[in-house]
Image (cartoon, rainbow, N blue to C red):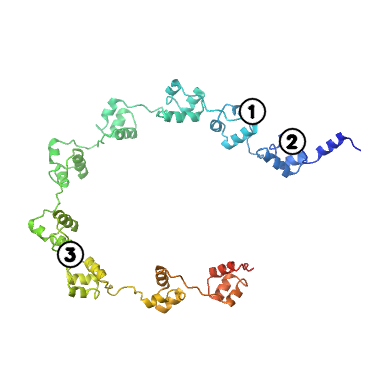
Amino acid sequence: MPAASDTKSVNSAKPGFGWSSAEIQLLGKAPDKDVALQLGKPEGAVMRKRLKLRIAKFDAQLRRWTKEEQELLRTMRNQEFSSRFGRTISAIQIRRIHLGIPQPKRSRPWTDKEDALLGKMPDPDLARQLNRPQISIGPRRRRLGIPAFHPLHRGWSKAEDELLGTMTDRKLAKRLGRTVQAVRMRRIKLRVPVRYENARPWRPVDDQLLGQRPDEQVAKLLGRTLNAVQNRRVRLGIVSRNWKAHQWTPAEDKLLGTAPDSEIARRLGCSESVVQVRRSKLGIPCHRHKWTAKEESILGQMSDEAAAKQIGCSVDAVKNRRFQLGVPIFEPKWKFWTAKEEQLLGTMMDAEVAKRLGRSASSVSSRRLQLHIPPARRPWTAEELSLLGTALDKIVAEKCGRTEKAIRSKRYVLNIPTPKR
């Protein structure tokens, strides 16, 4: 009978019986298949153990962790470590969990001396000088409203600001040694008007003409563009007169309300809106046509346009009166539904109703839906039900005269399996 020590050695040699510390260290250092062959264990057992211990899968292209990187995990945060060594945040977190290294707390508070250095040099150089992560420099600088360091950037003096608008942006940029875009952006920020190259100064005599005549006439007299005249007038706060406004006479005011506004506008040679505004201002009600029995008898006997011309009123007045009296339109392009036709809806298929009434199937279905009448469904016969599942749905649909969708839905309701091809 073997000894107890011999029994232990036999059991430990069995594949997959237990995991020693040396075997666990091999996990993830090579493919699971190679580790399984080396340890004499099943590949599935190796993979399950690796996943249980949260060990990443071996990858030939995966960069190995150095001792320096593992030591810096204790002092650097994940984002700083990722930007410095080019590793993903998830890879860093997995490595921390594997080594049991927590992420260090946030960096130390900022001092006044450190804040004074922000924007005086590039952010990477300042991060190196202050021994801070580079990712913390930018947010701190933006929070304090300090622009990023630029070797060509310099502040604007009062003397430079006073020169804005006195000459063109191109000339001023050349004089100050700045870019044209920098001059333009500074001028826009201070709301200084632009100075054109060929611009002529405005004289007091020129300003006196503004508002006294239409802008078009002032522009021709002064030899300036219409935009230049309008901009100068608006800048000086001079209101333009409405030179094209209609000058109303007492005789024209008497015409208001005696005929439709469109007719009066046609007579006076102005727009209909001008007539409406003047009539409303004087409190004159709009003209309403007084219908006679003879005029109402014309409605529906001819087109609305012809009736309006014959009666002497607007087309809208003819339409409104015809609707009030319930008179149908003359020679309509559609056919009104009768009570007998509506009784057929839902008693048979829409296509059959359309064929019988001489209408389109779409008009029949629209009228049926408008009246909330459910559609008529053709009952299934025993012969049609016996054909379900005996052939493809498309073939059965052709035999029964139904759609393929109807055949499929009925087969699903009756739990009839799909026929084999």
Query: Which circle, 2 or 3, is nearer the viewer?
Result: 3
Residue 89 vs 350, above or below: the answer is above
Residue holding disc 2: 23
Front residue of this view, candidates 210 and 79: 79
To which residue does mark 1 refer?
Answer: 67
Distance between mark 1 and mark 3 Cα atoms: 98 Å
| Residue 116 at least partly seen | yes
Query: What residue does disc 3 label?
Result: 288
Between 53 and 162, the one nearer to me in the picture: 53
Report crowding for label 1: few under 14, some 14 to 19, many 20 or more residues within 10 A (C-alpha): few
Quarter in which the N terminus is drawn: top right
Task: Pick whichever, 310 or 368, lies toward us.
Answer: 368
> Taking 318 as reference, is 90 above or below it?
above
**Mark 3 or mark 2, which is nearer the start of the sequence?**
2
Look at the image and tell me in which quarter the C terminus lies. Answer: bottom right
- Find residue 282 and report its horizontal and vertical position in percent: 13, 55
Which residue is drawn at the image coordinates 75% and 37% (left, top)? 19
Vertical placement of 212 versus 297: above or below?
A: above
Q: Amino acid at mark 1?
A: Lys
Seen at 67% across and 40% down, the residue is 51
Left or right of 247, for residue 418: right
Position of residue 366 measured from the top left corner of the image (x, y, whole percent): 40, 69
- In which quadrant of the rendered view does residue 415 lie? bottom right
Q: Amino acid at mark 2?
A: Glu
Mark 1 or 3: the one toward you: 3
User: Is label 2 in a helix, a strand or a loop?
Assistant: helix
